[in-house]
Amino acid sequence: MNTNRRDFLTLAGFTSLSLALPRSLRANTTPPHVLVIGGGFGGATVAKYLKLWGGNIDVTLIDRDASHYACILSNLVVTGAIPMSRIQLGYGNLKTKRGVNIVQGEALSVDPASKEVTVKIGNDFFAYAFDKLVLSPGIDFINPAGNYNSDLTPHAWKAGTQTLLLKNQLAAMAKKQTFVMTIPKSPYRCPPGPYERACSVADYLKRKKSGAKIIVLDANASIQAEPINFGNAFTKTYKDVLTYIPNVAVTEVDSATKTIVTSQGTFKGAVLNVIPNQRAGQIVANAGLVNDPTGKWALVDPLSYASTLYPDIHILGDSQGTGQPKSGHMANSQAKVCADAIIRSFSGEAPDPSPVTSSACFSPITSKTASWLTASFQYDPVTKAMKRVEPSFAEAPRPTSDGMEQMFHWADNIFADSFS
Amino acid sequence: MQPSSKPHVPSTLKRAATPRTILALSAVCACNPLPAAPPAGQLLSSQCFQCHGTNGQPVSGFEGIGGENANEMYKELLEMSLRKPEGIMDLQIRAYTPAQLRLIANYLSTLPKTSESDDD
């Protein structure tokens, strides 16, 4: 035991010395530690690929929930076409197959100077140290004025409990009643998503609730994604059940009476699905990283997704402000660029100078058909920004049943590529 | 618009037993190297994996793309990028320069064939 004690003291001295040195001078015995906040598509993918590509890196993924519910396919849960279990994605594979440390807790604040994150776990508070921090918390909402309460008028724009609330309200509608929904001002999570929801609900009402209608109140001047497919769906497929109104500014919402006052009149529905305007996740604001001109998103270097304020803090997915679309597919795509850049930085290398990111997605238009949308981005060294490659940008010529089949394959593969 | 509310953080924080602390005490002789620089084409190729599966091994539906002949794969990718678009893949491929497609084809050829399910 005596020798053990002496060894321990030697070890302790060595350890504190090694931690005091910069990484480049440190002995190779201590793996770098990357802390990832937020276990959606961005956070899960960056954690997985840091382990898959990085080898000797410790990765800790912190999320407030025990599992993630994907927004991808969630409109089909709302209409009852698929069960909630189909979009539930656990962290078990990241832990056992990839060796990611999984912690269930809520990140409250970031100290960029001491490189620590304060995390609430149960009733206790912990400080987690990091060499590199990745924030991928998704969106938070800018609630409308009035007596707004998302438990009564669900947004269902973060999947989970909210999805079930909206599903149950839709199912409880009587014939000839009205479903009112709002589309937030761009940029928001998933550009085609609200139009997809309008189509899914319209299809459901046509089939199940005779005489029922849907009113779609868009804060934007026009359809924000797949204007041909959604335009055709609104003016042809669903012309008898759907009313689309652009340029609608929301004045106030009363969730108790399911009433919404807008620049284009007051609307009341049996279901009121308000999808509020959006901003970066709260932890990004708490960390002082919201610095774009609109005051909503975090500016990053798209070669690494490092914050323009702190080089060791990276922001991925919906919260970052590069102008790329906010979607699960895009968050997965950016996460790979970020993981690669972090691994390179640990080897003293600069990031890849010409990354490509892409977003592909499939949207159900009816219960039997789906369309698709794709956009890809190349780094432009002149503007130092990701620039859309125009020849790669298109929507499906028309919704098809093949598209519906491909949609489920796409979901299966992106779920697995991100979470296992 | 930026939220100003700061979360309540108590003055006494517990130190989380981060992996760094644990491993620094336990793995003093492990002598593992820091991560090596990634191989060319790895990052670009990973942008195929959302649909074609991690390391080109899909779990559902789409074609496996690992372990194919590099020259044939490059030719196929180039053709897709030049023909009249028939589907989503022909659009996606237009994001890449011919030099990037060459890097992708070369890297994918080094991965296991699809029949092998281990994607590590």
Image (cartoon, rainbow, N blue to C red):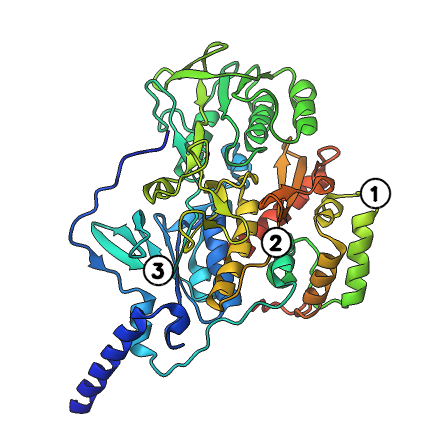
**From the viewer's perspective, is residue A129 above or below residue A331?**
below
A361 left or right of A166 in image: right
Location of residue A392 with respect to B96 vertically, above or below: above
Marks 3, 1: nearer the viewer: 3
Residue B84: mark: 1
Q: CA distance from mark 3 to mark 1?
A: 49 Å
Which chain is indicated by disc 3? A
Q: From this viewpoint, is residue B58 visible?
A: no
Image point (49%, 26%), residue name: A184
| Numbered disc 1: secondary structure | loop
Q: Could you give the CA–CA distance between mark 2 and mark 1, rounded to whole angstroms?
A: 25 Å
Percent of width and height locating residue B35: 49, 71
Asked which secondary structure carries label 2, the reply is: loop
Q: Which residue is mark 2?
A: A355
**Res A205 quadrant in image:** top right
- Is the C-beta separation of discs 2 and 1 under 8 Å? no
Chain label for disc 1: B
Q: Count neighbours of disc 2 (C-alpha within 10 A) and say few if under 14, some if 14 to 19, many if 20 or more.
A: many
The residue type indicated by label 3 comes to Phe
User: Disc 3 designates what residue?
Assistant: A130
Residue A35 screen position, x and y as percent? 38, 58
From the image, which quarter does the C terminus of chain B lie in? Answer: bottom right
Q: Residue furthest front?
A: A382
Neighbour class for label 3 at 10 Å: few (<14), some, many (≥20)?
many
